[in-house]
Image: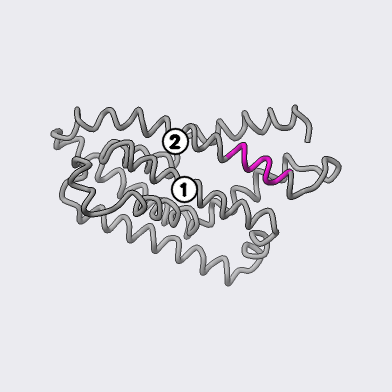
Amino acid sequence: MSSEVLLTFFITSLVLILTPGPDILYVLSQSITRGSKYGIATTLGQIGGLLFHLSLFAFGVSGLIIGSELIFTAVKIMGACYLFWLSYKVYNTADILVREDQQAAEKSFMGFVRQGLLMNIMNPKVMMFFLALFPTFISENAGNIKVQVFTLGLVFITQTLVVFTTVSIIASQLTDVLKSNRTFNSFLKWMQIVVFTGLGIYILI
């Protein structure tokens, strides 16, 4: 794989990562509401989900799933139901902006890792993203296909980790400033509800 291809992929994927979407908005909201620790935990979970879908793509499983209308529909329904459930949980939360020590007893660091992981694993749009983006940069003349896939995947995942972690650290600085602001509290609550519900509907249609 040439350096020109890697550079083009690097720029393309970075632009896509920086484009506001459900994943980065969720990390942003978790970082503001609970601090960088939980924002980074969510990021690590999402990275695990990316690795899962990358592996499916590399070994051809993604193509088989999308090629089967029954299996793909089942995956979409499960993913949407999980997101609707998260939306319902946020709706029933009285205060979104809370101190980290109040949350520690309710959900562990690994609990947020698992939530981020499940969000990406159960989102078939991530699967479709790899199928749409990666083939453009892969060539049979550039060597082993799986090596190319995992090389591009490593670049994409590293970029995601750096960008999301940076967003998490910066956003967490707003927690103490905004935790007593009831208007912003309500805004964050409904932003998460809209993100989860909107992504669930998007997956279904």
Give 74 or 26, whichever is nearer the viewer: 26
Residue 205 visible (yes or no): no
Tell me the element at label 2: helix
Looking at the image, residue 165 sits to the left or right of residue 144; the answer is left
Rendered image: mark on residue 69:
none
Judged by its main secondary structure, the magenta piece is helix
| Residue sticking out furthest to the bottom | 70
Please identify the quarter of the rendering in which residue 70 is found. Answer: bottom right
Tell me the element at label 1: helix
Determine the residue positioned at 68% across, 41% down.
151
Mark 2: which amino acid?
Phe
Quarter of the N terminus within the rendering = top right
Give the residue pinned by disc 1. Answer: 46
> In the image, which residues are magenta?
148-156
Q: Is residue 153 magenta?
A: yes
Rendered image: mark on residue 164:
2
Q: CA distance from mark 1 to mark 2?
A: 10 Å
**Does residue 70 lie above or below 123 as drawn?**
below
- Is disc 2 surrounded by few (<14), some (14 to 19) or many (20+) residues within 10 Å? many
